[in-house]
Each structure stands twice: as C-alpha cells, then as structure tokens.
Amino acid sequence: MSCSNCKASLANVEYVEKDEKDFCLNCYNQLFGKYCAKCQTLILIGAKIAKHEGKFWHKDCFQCYSCQTKLTKFEIGDDKQVYCHTCYTEKYGPKCVICCKAIVKSLRYVEAGGRLFHEDCFRCGSKLCAKKLENGFIPKDNQFFCPECYRDIISKHTFRETLTCPSLINSDLFYTEEQIMKSKAQEMKTELMSIVQPVKRTLLIPKVPKDTSSLTATDETQTASYLFPNLIMKAAVHNGSIQLQSGELSKQTVDIIVVCSTSDTFLKDVLQQAGLTVQNDYDRLLSLTNQQDSIVETEAGNLSCQAILFCPWIAPTDRDPEKLSNSVSDYMSKCLNHILYHPKVYRTAAFSAMGYDLSQCSMDIIAKTMINTAKAKLAETLLYFDISFFVPSNEYDVHQKFAEKLTLIQQPLEPFGYVDRLFSKVSLTLTAKQEANLKQCRSTVDTHIQSLTQTEMRTNEDLHAWTQQLVLIFYKYCLDRHIWPMISFEQKKLSLTGRKDAIGEADKYFLELTNQALKQTHLQAISRSVLWEYQIDGTTWQNYSYKSISEIEYAYSFQKLSSLDIINEQDEQCRIDFSNNTETFNDRIRSIRRQHLVSISLPMNWQCQSNNCCRFVLNEDTEEYKSIKQSFDQTMVNVYKSIKSIERIQNQRWYKQYAAHRDAMNERLKENTERRLFHGCSETAANSIIEECFNRAFAGVNGTVYGHGAYFAANAIYSNSFTRPDSAGVRCMFVASVLIGKTILGNSSMKVPPRGYDSTTDNNQIFVVYHDAQAYADYLIKYQ
C-alpha cells in the first residue's frame, strides 16, 4: 500500500483515506489541509478547530478580533470579524448620548425622548443643578430638567397662571376630565399641570326647629348613629360646650384626657400607647397614695394631649339606679373639680363612655348622669371650657344613648351635629410662551371647570313639614354623591353644590322627601279632625281603625279618588266607593260616612301643647298624681320599691277618635261602659303605644286565651306580670280608659268579638278589645 500522491509506502505509518484514495499525512495536509485565519499556518489533522462562514481557526487562535480574548460565544461585526459580546457592544451597540460609551445590558440605563442614557449620566440639564433625575423630569429643547429647574427656566421666558378647582370636586371626576382639559390646552400652545390634594370640610347638619312628626329623640339619634357613625354632636352650655364623638380616647388632642383606672381595658390601652415613662410614673404616684379612691395625674408621654388624669370608679354590684347614678355623678364631679380648678388652666377635656361592659349597669342612666353632671359643672364655674365624650366606634348602642341625652340639652338654634368629609383640592398651573395663548386657555379651562360643578338654590315653603330624620337621610344621600347640601329652615331655602347631573337627581329626591313629609303631615292633620265609620246595622255605626281613617281621608280629600282598596281590622280586603258611600267585601255591602271631630273637646286637665303628641310628668304633690298612685297601690303595695314617674299622655288625634267612638257607643248602648284599666308592657312597646295607640300590632302580645286583641286588667297586680324591666329594673304600666261595651266570654279562636258584642272577657278582671279607638292610654307609670 502506497500514498496516491508521493507513492511512498504507507506500511506502519498513519495515513488518511479520501475519495477512495490513500494519502500520507504530509501529502494530505498539502493537498487538502486548512489554514488558520489567525496565524495563517496549516491546521494539522486531528487538531481542534473552530469554523465560521468558511473560515477555520486553531482553537487557541479563535479570539476576539479586538481584545484577543478566547471565544466561546461570539458576535460577527460589519467587517466580518468575530468579536466577544463586550467588544461588539462597544463597537456596534447603542451609546449613551452623554458619555458616548456603550449601554451594557447588565447596567441600569434610562430611555427618554428616544435616546439612551446611563443612569448616572441622566442628570438635570441645568449646569447649576446637574442632579440625577430620580424623581421625574421635564423635557425642553432636547434637554431634560428636574421640575424645580424647569419652573425657573419657564418663569423667565413664559407666562404662567394658577387656577383652583372647587374643593367639592372628587378625584375620580377630575382625573376623567383632566385629559380633556390638557388636550384643549395643547390646542392653544399651553401646558397644563395639576396638583391634587385631599381637603377636609365640615358640614353642619341643621336641627329642625319644630319637629311635628311622631319621631322621638331615640328615633332621631338611632338614625344619626346609623347614617353618620362619625357624627360630631355639640351642645353649648353657658361659656363652654359638651361634645360627643366616636373614636379612641388615647388619640385625642385635648388638654387632658380622663381614664377610668378601674377599667382594665381603658387603663391598659392608654398606658401602652403613652409609653413606659408614663407607666412608671403612674405606678410610682399610685404607690404614694394609700387611698383606693385617689386620683393620679401624669404627663402625656407619647399621646397628643398634655396630661392624663386617672380616676377610679366602682360600679354598684346591684341594679339600684339611684346608686348607679350617684356613683357616676361622684366620679364626674371629682374629675371635673380637679380639672376646672387646676393651676395649669386646662380648657379642653375628654372622657370615655364607661360601664357598657358591665351587665348590671344601665347605659341610659350612665349617659344621662355623665352629661347632666358635666352640664351642671359648666353652669357652676362659667368658665370657657369644652368637655368631650368619646364612644368606641363599634359601640353603636352606647353612642345612641349618649346622643339621645345630648339632644335634650341642645339649644333650639344649635345645629343637630357636624360631619367631616374628605374632598379633593385641585390646583391647575397654565404655562404658555404667549400671553394671548395663556388668556385664551385660562378662559377655556375656567369655563370647563365651572361646568363640572354648580350651585342650585331653591326656596320651599314646605320645609316646615320636614322631620329631623328626613334631614339626616337627605344629607347622607347628598354626601354619598359628592354634593354639598345646606338647608336653612329659617329662610326656607335649600342650596346644593356639586356635579350638574348629580344635583338634578338630588333635587328630585328632595322633592320626593318633601312630598312624603307633606303627606305624613296631612295624614296627621286630617286624622285629628275627621272620623270615617261603617254601618253595622240600622242604628249602629263603627269607626275605622286609626290607620284606615288616615288612608281613607287622604284618598278622599287630597287624591280625589273615586274608590280605594283597604285591609280592615278583620284582615278583610274591602273596596271603599266614595261616589256611593259604600264598603264592599265579597257579597257584603255596607254604608260608610264621614264625620268632623272639631266639636270634640280635650280634657280640662290637659296642658297646652304645640305638637299632636306630648308627655307631661306629673308633680307628686298634685291630686292627679295621688289619684293615679292610689288606684295603682290598691293591688301593688309592697310589690314595687318606688315610682320613678307618672306621665300624662296627650295624643290629640288618638283621643278625639277615642272620644267619638265612646260617644257613638254610649248612644248605641244607652249607657256608659268606660272603665279605668291597666296594661303592662316593655318600655319599647310603651313608646310605640303612646305614638300609635293600642293598634292591631299588639294583638296577642299578652296572650290569646280570651281572643286576639289588646288585653287590659282591672287589677294592676295582674298587668305587672306582663311588664318587662329595663337594664335598671324599671317597669312600665299604662292606666287606660277602655270602652268595654257589650262583652262576652272569650276564647283563643276569636279574632273579633261575635256580632253584637264589643269586647271579650274572662268574666272576672280581664278585658280584650279589638278596635284602635276602643282604648286610650291616659297615664304611663314607671316604677321599680
């Protein structure tokens, strides 16, 4: 075997076969070998090589064309040479426009205006500043400036003006409109910049001068607490004031806060937030006093107030309301005496509601005593001093109790309360090179701003019909829609400020509420002087229920309807036909009639009243008081501890209907069947009965053994078993005038008396009546 080229023997030597021919290594390298693109020497067979686009390299010669670094990864330049990534980037990659060095991907860089910068090279274009643009930049004339330098530059060469949007605008609305205003500004070669800041505004909620509705103070404060959890209520007392707010005592910025030191919850919270120094100071001062009832004053530590007063309060273990009231009064007096006559001259103090975590304590008594004691102390000292009561935001019922008591001491012209709301304060800065452009833009933007909000005034003579509850509901409705309402009952005016479309809806809602108030007022007014009756037989007439009379009269006198569907006392759906003066139920048709009650006089012992329903507490020395107590004591002596009060109930509307019913019954039966009876119930039921009478809602409340109606007893001891004590152990019992009429033994199946009878009975002392106007609550006895 020999080399195909040089014919030398290939025995015992290495050779290469190519194209079915054998070559010695020397001939093969000369004929077919590759030369290194770097060193231009022959690459011997078996040597490690690199290859790219027809070129070959020794492995050690495969280096970056620029830095001579051996390559594992490479880039091909425009000159067809191979480069490492770094050298390729330096030669062909993007450059920083400041230092002209390459932008390496591993380093942070900035892209602005279509150009690239090293992060450290991206600086303010002002030579006097040249700080890194880390917090925003503004481009100008192919340079970039920080906002401060930009404003300085612009101010020297441009015209500028600042506009302020109404603070009632909400941020969501503004951000929607901002792009529209910026687009308009650009059309006038003007730049628009905005600053949005939150701003707090306090809204005054007016008090209704004369609330002629049937709402009680409890109804009003419950509505207020529900709609406005952060409502601030205030009552002026001589030169000072008493306020009520929701919040934490430890976060208040008053001169001094008062902590009930026997309440572990309050004490721990305040000491923890005040800090270790106050904790140690409190422990030290407490150890110096050996008396259990001593009070301790410390610095405020980390709190926002100036000082902290720690005072113990020991709640009575029994439910004696007098003991509870006295203990709270002593606590308040001790604290206020210390504060009001302090040499440091404190002007504001904050208390926290207390006792609500103790089951034996009546919050009604605690709230009343704390507020009344504060009022008495302010009246006694005549100092300029403000006392605030704070209730935890989650204690809804406690807040309502304090609110109810505070409304009782408010002056007639004082606001009902105050509410803080956050709105957005928007400042717009307009900048232009030409003054004419600036003026044109200012006019356009100003017009656009004014279109966002508007103020609408309305004079309404019917505001007299509004109740405090309607005011609270309407104000809540407006604030939820970023509308600022202002009602003046004195001027009978309404002002609404906000978005135009939202104001339109609010105005409609105002009119709806006004119509609702007028309807309620009309219903109350007409039911005082009108009676509707239906004919039972040829000579017997029965008046409709309290509620039905109002519905029928409203449909007849105000709506001018020809007919009306009602549900009567027997749960029958009847049609009232005003044209024929008939009532139809299935096949039964009976006559109806309308009578005026103007001639019915009120009892001689009643006092003058401005509202339809009033309650008057009787003086213990009067014969009226003694007479009611005597009838109560006939069966209740040694059963109760004390009588807290006897109230005379003066509900004109209810009494007139009762009197008309009494006169009709006397005429029909030819005898007077009126009886003085008793009715026991809970305080909640008592308040409802005083406003709405013994209507069908109370049917069966005290049992149904003798029929499904309102139960009365001849003996107070029997009615006592149906009373429900409140948290202070106080019970309620009515002394009522009841029209027995013709009575019959009742049973549990009776929904109404049999035909020809007026009531049912146990044939002893229990009487059950079924008509709203068949009983009138003359007096309410509260006893313990």
Image (cartoon, rainbow, N blue to C red):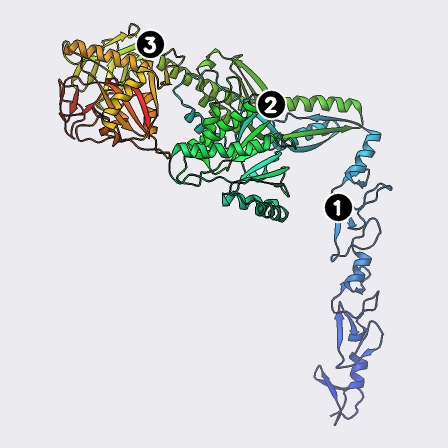
Q: Position of residue 772 (x, y in %)?
A: 26, 19
Is residue 345 visible from the viewing direction of this image? yes
> Of circles 1 and 3, which is in front?
3
Q: Which mark is residue 134?
A: 1
Label 3's element?
A: helix
How packed is label 1: few (under 14 Cα within 10 Å), some, or many (20 or more)?
few
Sequence order check, earlier mark of 1 and 3:
1
Circle 2/circle 3 CB separation < 8 Å: no
Residue 757 in the image: above or below residue 728: above
Rendered residue at 27%/13% (across/down): 657
In the rendered image, the residue lying farthest to the front is 290
Q: Is residue 289 found left or right of 76 in the rendered image?
A: left
514 versus 125 height, above or below: above
Which type of secondary structure does the marked residue at label 1 adopt?
loop
Measuring from the top left, give residue 296's x and y in whole percent: 58, 41
Foreground of the two, 318 or 218: 318
**Relative side of 427 to 618, left or right:** right
Residue type at mark 3: give it.
Answer: Ser
Q: Quadrant of the C terminus?
A: top left
Residue 49 location, quadrant: bottom right
Residue 646 left/right relative to 592 = right
Q: Position of residue 54 (x, y in %)?
A: 76, 69
Residue receiving disc 2: 453
Q: Which residue is at the front of the view, 329 or 401?
A: 329
Q: x, y percentage for residue 60?
A: 80, 75
* Callout 1–callout 3 Cβ contact below 8 Å: no
Numbered mark located on residue 557 in the image = 3
